[in-house]
Amino acid sequence: MAAPQGSKLKLLAFAGSLRKDSLNKKLIQAWASIAQKQGVEVTLIELNDYELPIYNGDIEEHAVPENVRKLQELCSEHDGFLIASPEYNGAVPALIKNTLDWISRPLENGDSGVSVLKGKVCGIAAASPGGLGGLRALLLLRDQLAKLSLWVAPSQFALSKAPDSFSNGELTNESAEKALANIVQEVRGFYE
């Protein structure tokens, strides 16, 4: 695929958790820093700043929430995405599913919202206190993103026993840093 417009790859990054002290928020912050060290421009957003109702066609029919339009615009301005997802009961959290459902709704000009995602690249990772590190959610997230016409980097990363890998909010696990850096390289390679 041809390189994106401009001199730097631009990625939109977020965690699929609203909790203030979320392990996945810590993971996405570390991942954004790793990507920036590789020359990638990263916009790290907090989904708490884009509060959305649960998707409901009646709400959409009346008026698409302004935060949906803001997220669609952000997606259109970026070449790809980095997503850190918790695992809730072996699945992708409702927050990520709901955010993607809203983003995929028609744009103001009537075009499909999927157009702001289609053909872009996405790296995925998870952090969990459990032994699988959120792996089951990543398998489902990969499938969900592919159905929205995103190319998901071949490698993914699940950080098990995640509380042991952070100190004062900073990622201290060297193998985790290497795995995240590898995914960034795969994301960059999509455009090279």
Image (cartoon, helix red, strand yellow):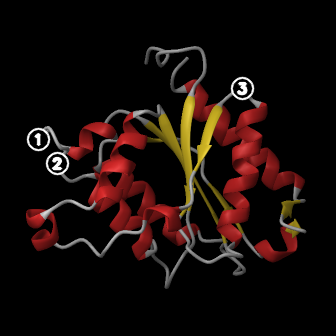
**Residue 9 position in % (x across, y down):** 57, 26
> Spatial distance from mark 3 to mark 2, Cα to Cα?
33 Å
Circle 1 sits on which residue? 110
| Marks 1 and 2 in Cβ contact (< 8 Å) | yes
Residue 96: image quadrant is bottom left
Which residue is rendered at x = 44% and y = 61% of the image? 141
Q: Nearer the viewer, mark 1 or mark 3?
A: 1
Q: Residues within 10 Å of mark 2 (few under 14, many from 20)?
A: some
| Residue 7 in view in this figure | yes
Q: Is residue 191 above or below residue 106?
A: above
Q: Who's the residue at 87% across and 59% down the image?
A: 173
Q: Secondary structure at mark 1?
A: loop
User: Residue 89: x and y, percent?
Assistant: 49, 85
The quarter of the picture where residue 43 lies is top right
The structure residue drawn at horizontal position 73% and vertical position 35%, both measured from the top left corner, is 36
Could you tell whether 24 is left or right of 119 in the image?
right
Badge 3 marks a residue whose secondary structure is: loop
Q: Earlier in the sequence, mark 3 or mark 2?
A: 3
Q: Which residue is mark 3?
A: 39
Give the residue number, with chain letter if any, for mark 2: 106
